[in-house]
Image: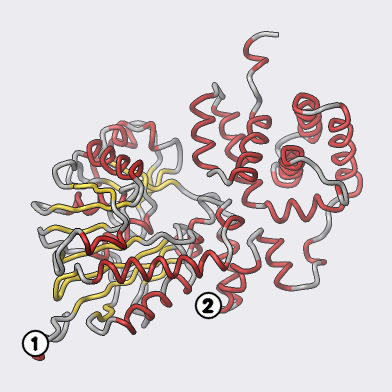
Amino acid sequence: MNNKEKEPTARFLAVDILTRIESNNSYSNLLLNQTMHKQHLSRVDGNLLTKMVYGVLQHRLTLEYWLEPFIKPKKIETWVKQLLLISLYQLQYLDKIPRHAVLNEAIEIAKKRGHDGIRKFVTGVLHAVIRQGLRNLQDIKQPLKRLSITYSVPEWIIESLQRQVGEEKTIKILASLMKVPHQAVRVNTSHIPVADAIAQLQQEGFEIKKSPIFPASLILNNGHALNSTLFREGKIMLQDESAALVVDSMQPFEDKIILDACAAPGGKTMQIADSLKSGKVIALDIHQHKVKLIRENARKCGFSAQVTAQTMDARNASEHFAPDSFEQVLVDAPCSGIGLMRRKPEIRYEKTSADSNNLQRIQLGILEAVSVLVAPKGKLTYSTCTILNTENEKVINMFLKKHPEFEQLKTTTSYHLKDDKKLGLTIYPDEYDSDGFFIATLCKKNVGDEADDFCV
């Protein structure tokens, strides 16, 4: 057997990655990147690996529902379950792959990773699936369970969205999560104009589309931005368009010192630095290894002079900075990340409603701590990458009740996206095919001077 034959196949690697995700709560994007870097996969096999990992995660509840009657009541090892889910996914969703190829590869993996009993079990299950067919999802009687299994989203998230936006909008959001996330980059316009960035990327073979929601964001329809010259030179950054709206909403910047209180990995910090002429941004994060990442990004993007990164819990920031120190403070708060379900599909299975409630307390604690650092007439911007009111509007309302010295302003961006009466801006995944995000803009009143007790 030569070396090429010994190399693990895309399906074998997919079993390994999905097993580690379920057993260790590992992140799919990190494991995929590590595997791609380590293994010598062809472009076809690399694409198949990515499609299988994300496909199984995206449809996990559906696939488990279909698999259940064929394995019940037998308890099986995690890797065997993942092998069966991958096989079901290929049979049901990847119609270009021949059935015999799915069966043969599954049996080969079962034989290689397990013993003869597992090989026979996998063979029997897959033949039974092909012979008997899969359960019809429309036969699920309970409406909430039917939605959950159909769109592979836990019931608590669906219930939260139904209360928040109603049944019709919820279904639109759920349907949008089945799409493949597009790849967006933000141009560091202090280094290169957007038009020049487009031209250079096109010269390297990338198909480019302009973002409909942020002028310096581009959508790459092919290839990977990591392989571009502009990325290596720090002139573009991987950043979803919705994330770019946060700093966009903070414009224009006074050339002063700005605080990014929860900064890692530094995408918004770099965007602030890119917008400054002579000011600086102080970036905080509680984890030292993440602060190192911020510094590395600043160096790569040529913003080391503008960015100061410090290891600090934002809830202790008032012990290190004087009151009224900053004209602008950004709290991109730790959150459940539910707005990223399309890009990081495993998030939906890892989080619970209790997690969302616990995060609310942390988010409020951070806002409380940094509020004293905002100068009179200064702005405090709050953002999350979740679409749940528990961590968004409710947090802002609770904060404002305790802090009458702040008022909420209408959040606006370069492209006026929503003409509704809400002050905060919520971007849902179905609206622009981008990540879900929330942004609120608060202003500190000039309390004590009755003639100047306002923000605008």
Task: For the N terminus, give its image quadrant.
Answer: top right
Q: Is mark 1 on a helix, strand or loop?
A: loop
Is 110 on the left or on the right of 298, as rendered? right
Q: Which quarter of the rendering shows the C terminus? A: bottom left
Residue 304 occupies which quadrant of the picture?
A: top left
- Which residue extends farthest front? 319
- Local crowd at mark 2 within 10 Å, few (<14), some, or many (≥20)? some
Residue at image position (8%, 90%) is 451
Question: 437 and 259: which one is in front?
Answer: 259
Q: What amino acid is labelled 1 in the image? A: Asp
Q: Quick one: which residue is furthest to the top in this view?
A: 2
Residue lying at 75% horizontally and 42% vertically, measured from the top left: 81
Is 429 situated left or right of 290 in this image? Answer: right
**Residue 306 drawn above or below residue 61:** above
Q: In which quarter of the image is residue 129?
A: top right
* 108 w.r.t. 174: above or below: above
User: Circle 2 sits in a helix, a strand or a loop, which is it?
Assistant: helix
> Given this view, does label 1 or label 2 mark the residue nearer the observer?
1
Q: Mark 2 points at which residue?
A: 164
Mark 1 lies on residue:
449
Residue type, label 2: Gln
